[in-house]
Structure formats: structure tokens, C-alpha cells
Image (cartoon, rainbow, N blue to C red):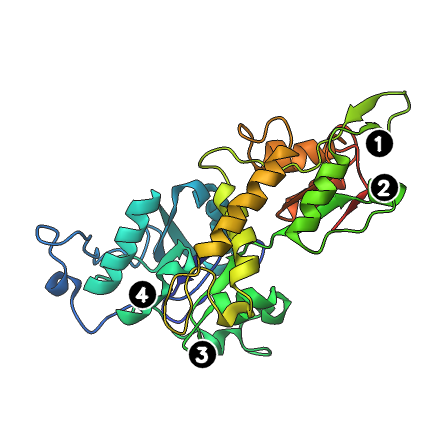
Amino acid sequence: MLLILFLLQLGIIASAAASHQTMTIRRRVQEESPLATCDPEQHQCRCQDNDNDHDLQGRRSIRVASFDIHCLRLRRNADAFESIANITIELECLGYNELHEEILADAKLKTGYYDGFMFGPFLTGEMVKVGGLHDLTPYVQQGGAYDLRWNDMFRFNRENAAVYDNKVVMIPLDGDVLSFYYRKDLFEKYDKQPPKTWEEYTELAKFFHGKVEPLPGSSSNETVTLSGSCVGRKFRCQEEHWIILILSSMTQHSGTKTGFLFDTSNMEPLLGEAFVETIRFTEEQFAYGADNEMEGCFGSTNIAKMNSGQCAMTYGWGDSFTEGAKGPPTSFVSGLIGT
């Protein structure tokens, strides 16, 4: 999920290039008094504190709402920003559902309680409808006043996920890019080519599964038994990402201009046969999978099994490549992972 942070404070935009989150600007409505539109006794909202704009040292103060699980990371970046901008950043750490309710309530009632938000882009449409987002296009233009290195971002994030109605309304700080990873040495040893289809992935998983191979980088005669595919499938872990990955490869046939769950021309569901195939591919991969797939997540299965030399193939985020590049004991397959 792409995580988005919206941030505006009297025309000052803060860059968080070192973070893996996202930044955007939310419109602060000043035409109406917050008390005229927000009554905590009647609405699910918080009213703006008139003294909120400055901290005890007289510095400009801004308030940002975030998922609680990301507050520590944001706090580190906020501290760095405060040291150079003479601005105090207050972080409010909220649960997943609570955060979304707060964001929409603040935008709809125009309370101005929050200056910025961090959340996924699935709320973008609703936020635009209630006037909750600011046009950031001038801020991200190359050669402008703010050096955001816009063209250095992954193209999908800057041209699709960050854009609504041809306007940049958010600044990505984190985005999912899932890739295929495989043991180059094993594929070369058995003269195999990386798969181009899910059928080929299953065939290769079946071929490698159960083979006994020398432990890479080991000076002894230690061996490992291979799993053909290593994908963590623990309930409520990352399984939804893998399902979406397989399903979208069949339904989102024309890139971002088409949907993966609904046909964008008529909003008809795109599940049907494609979802049946998704379940079939998942079952086949599991049959040649690691022994801890149902108990493991991305780190303990996709990464750890590959790094221990026990896995022929996996898919996931870039951590697979960066962690795999480390030496023992973190990884025994440094230099042997292809993508």
C-alpha cells in the first residue's frame, strides 16, 4: 500500500526524501471559524485550538496525523526537519480505522485541526470531493523552489498514485514494487530460464523442490534441501499482496488505465475465471513451498528461506535483494540472487 502524508503550513512544504513514507499538502480552510462548523457534541471531530499555531518557544507548530505503526519513523524525520526549519511538528498516532475517520471528518467539517495526514491513496477521491487536498503541481516541478527530485521517484508513484484529475495532490514517500527473485547459480547449473508466466513458475518450483544442494558459501560439505517456492502466507500477514499480484497480472491487462478488480469502462467486477486461476496458482505454489509458509510472513519465509540457501524462487519487495546481498550469517546467497 502506498502511504501518503499531506502537509501544509502557511505555504511551507517540508521534504522527507530520506523517509519511506509520503508527503502531500492539505488545504487549511481559514474562511470559516472551526467552531462554526465543528461541534464535538454533535460531530465526530476535534476543534482547532486557537493557540495551536505556535509552541512554547514561539516557533511555528504544525500537527500531523499518522498510522501508529509509522509514528517512530516519522518522528525521526520530523526531528531532522525541525532542526533546520525552526518548526515544531506534533505527531498524533492513531489506529488504522480511527485515522481514516479523523481525516475525513477534519476535511468534511473543515476544522483545520490537522495540518497533515499520512495514509494510503484509496482515500484520495473522497478527500478531493470534500476539498481536502491542495494542488501540489507547482511544488514538484523541476527547477522550482523545492528540490524534491521528483523525476527520481518511481514513475508509477509520481505519475499515477500521486495524481488526481491531472493534478499532483500527494508526494510519495513509500510505494510497493514487487519483483521476482531466484537463485542464479541453480538456474545456471540446470540450464533453466526465469519464468515468464505463472504456469512456468509452478513448473520450475516443482523441478527444484526437494533437491539436495550444497550450502552456498560453506567450506564444509553441508547441504540443504530446496523448496521450489518460498512465500509467507500467514493469515493477516502479507497474503493479500500475493493474491493481488497474481490476479492483477491477468485482469489489469492494459496497465494503470485499467482496473484489476473492476472494469473501468462499466465498473463490472473482473474476478470470475481470473480469480479461480489465482487460487489455482496459489495452491500449486504452496504444494512446492517452504515448510513454514502458513506460519511465516515476508521476512521469515520469503527473505530468510532464500538467504539460508533453502529456496530456489520467491517474490516480494526490494528487501529480498538488499538483505540477500549481505554476507553470512544474514545471507549465504550473496551475489547469487537474480531479479
Q: Nearer the viewer, residue 187 or 50?
A: 187
Q: Label 2: which residue?
A: 185
Q: Residue furthest front?
A: 273
Q: Label 1: which residue?
A: 216
Residue type (three-letter) at the residue carrying disc 3: Asn
Q: Label 3: which residue?
A: 166
Answer left or right for 236 relative to 54: right
**Marks 2 and 4, the one that precedes in the sequence:** 4
Secondary structure found at label 3: loop
One can see residue 139 in this view? yes
Answer left or right for 2 relative to 291: left
Answer left or right for 138 relative to 308: left
The image's mark for residue 127 is 4
Q: Nearer the viewer, residue 161 or 152?
A: 161
**Marks 2 and 3, the one that precedes in the sequence:** 3
**Marks 3 and 1, the one that precedes in the sequence:** 3
Residue 334 location (% of width, % of height): 80, 39
CA gap, disc 2 to disc 4? 49 Å
> Mark 2 touching mark 1, by CB under 8 A?
yes
Q: Residue furthest left?
A: 41
Residue drawn 54% across the image and 64% down it: 157
Q: Nearer the viewer, mark 2 or mark 4?
A: 2
Answer left or right for 195 relative to 273: right
**Marks 4 and 1, the one that precedes in the sequence:** 4
